[in-house]
Amino acid sequence: MGLFPPWKYTFNSSMGHSEEPAGYAFIAFPPSRRVNNAMNGVEIDATRLLIQWAMAILASGFGVLVNSTRKEEQNT
């Protein structure tokens, strides 16, 4: 997840701000801008990345919990 994070296209102007998903790309080679000007950009979608990390941590914790419960049952 850290090597291929989710990216988003951004657009900032005096009239407003918008964001669209740009998919996943290698951290060293982000997706290129749709239009090459100062108002358009590409950045890591931190919200989606944090959700992915949280889900991975929860799934790992659940796996450890289930595995430790099984070991206790096998020892008794």
Image (spheres, helix red, strand yellow):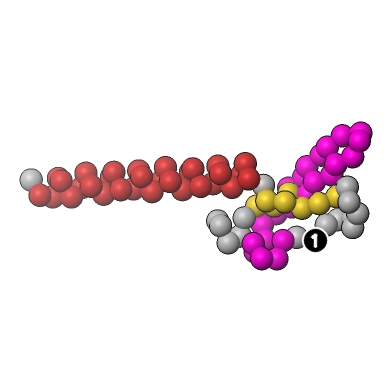
Q: Position of residue 66 (x, y in %)?
A: 28, 45
Residue located 67% across and 47% down the image:
45
Front in this rendered view, residue 38 or 35: 38
Given the image, on which type of amino acid does mark 1 rest? Ser
The residue identified by callout 1 is: 32
The residue sitting at 72% across, 61% down in the picture is 30
Q: Quadrant of residue 14?
A: top right
Residue at image position (72%, 51%) is 43
Chief SS of the magenta region: strand
Q: Residues within 10 Å of mark 1 (few under 14, many from 20)?
A: few
Q: Quadrant of the N terminus?
A: bottom right
Q: Tally the marks.
A: 1
Q: Residue at x 36, y 45 (%)?
A: 61
Question: Residue 13: within the magenta?
Answer: yes
Quarter occupied by the C terminus: top left
Picture coordinates of residue 32 (x, y %)? 80, 61
Left or right position of 32 against 67 = right
- Please say if 46 is above or below 36: above
Asked if the magenta segment contains residue 48, the reply would be no
13 horizontally vs 49: left or right: right
Q: Which region of the structure is painted magenta? A: 9-30
Tell me where residue 34 appears, x and y as whole percent: 86, 56
> Which image quadrant for residue 27?
bottom right
Q: Horizontal placement of 3 versus 8: left or right?
A: left
Return the residue nearer the eye: 49 or 23: 49
Relative placement, left or right, of 64 versus 29 is: left
- Closer to the camera, 46 or 55? 46
| Element carrying mark 1 | loop
